[in-house]
Amino acid sequence: MRAPADTIIPLDDALSFETGAAVGCGTGTAWGGLQRLGDIGGATIAVFGQGPVGLSATLLAAARGARVIAIDPMPSRLEHAARVGAEATLNPTECDVPTAVRDLTGGSGVPLVLETSGASPAIADGLGVLAPWGKIALIGLGGEVRFPVLGAHRLQISVLPSISMSIMAQRQCAEFIVSKNLDIDGLYSHRWRLDQVVEAYEWFDQQDAGKGVFLFDD
């Protein structure tokens, strides 16, 4: 595929094309959301949704020194989140998330939230777990944000929509992955050839698994 040269970033020899594809999409989107939240090292962050973007965020945040609480209704995704660095996992079908998060944080809540699912209940829970002066970055699309202004005014929270990232941020993300030797390829649950495209999209439409990638022959 031909593309303008100024839209291209170099792919380090240590990275696979699969990792490059992730940086250009879900993993890079997670990186952009974390950048919106600022310095996360040493902080506790709740990551809502552990699909491809959320798992990337959990992996990247843990690698940047954050304590990650991963939240998702699918046990398999929570297990994956624990493998890539989440210190705690919560299933919203089994617990009240705001209460559980405050139990994990001594009642204070978290200073940082990254919401990747786009589900309105998850956004509401994300707002509900914030500590005073906390920040929530919204990546997931489709949901609505509703909160009482008076309560938010008292807490001094920041609501930060985030989508994708710049070419410079993509390069920073790729360089960080190399420096930390992160296994981005491990985020993929399925690999397909082009002659399997129908099967791949039928699987994708189920919206109940992980992340897939098309591989090209050499």
Image (cartoon, rainbow, N blue to C red):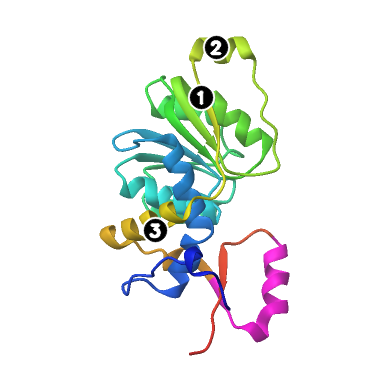
Residue at horizontal 50 percent and vertical 21 percent from the top: 157
Task: Name the amino acid type tagged 3.
Answer: Arg
Question: Is 120 left or right of 108, judged from the image as shown?
Answer: right
- Residue drawn at point x = 54 percent, y = 80 percent: 215
Q: Which tag, 1 or 2, sits closer to the chain's start?
A: 2
**How far is disc 1 from disc 3 in space, using C-alphas?**
27 Å
Q: In x, y percent, where is residue 171?
A: 39, 58
Q: Is residue 55 magenta?
A: no
Residue 67 against residue 149 in the figure, above or below: below
Q: Residue at x 56, y 15 (%)?
A: 152
Of 77 and 64, nearer the camera is: 64
Give the structural element (helix, strand or loop) at label 3: helix
For image coordinates 41% across by 63% down, the residue present is 184
Q: Going from the N terminus, do you reach mark 1 or mark 3 first? A: 1
For marks 2 and 3 on the same chain, the one whose residue lies earlier in the sequence:
2
Residue that label 1 marks: 158
Mark 1 touching mark 3, by CB under 8 A? no
**Residue 201 lies in the magenta stretch:** yes
Visible residue check, residue 119: yes
Which residue was labeled with disc 3? 171
- Residue assigned mark 2: 153
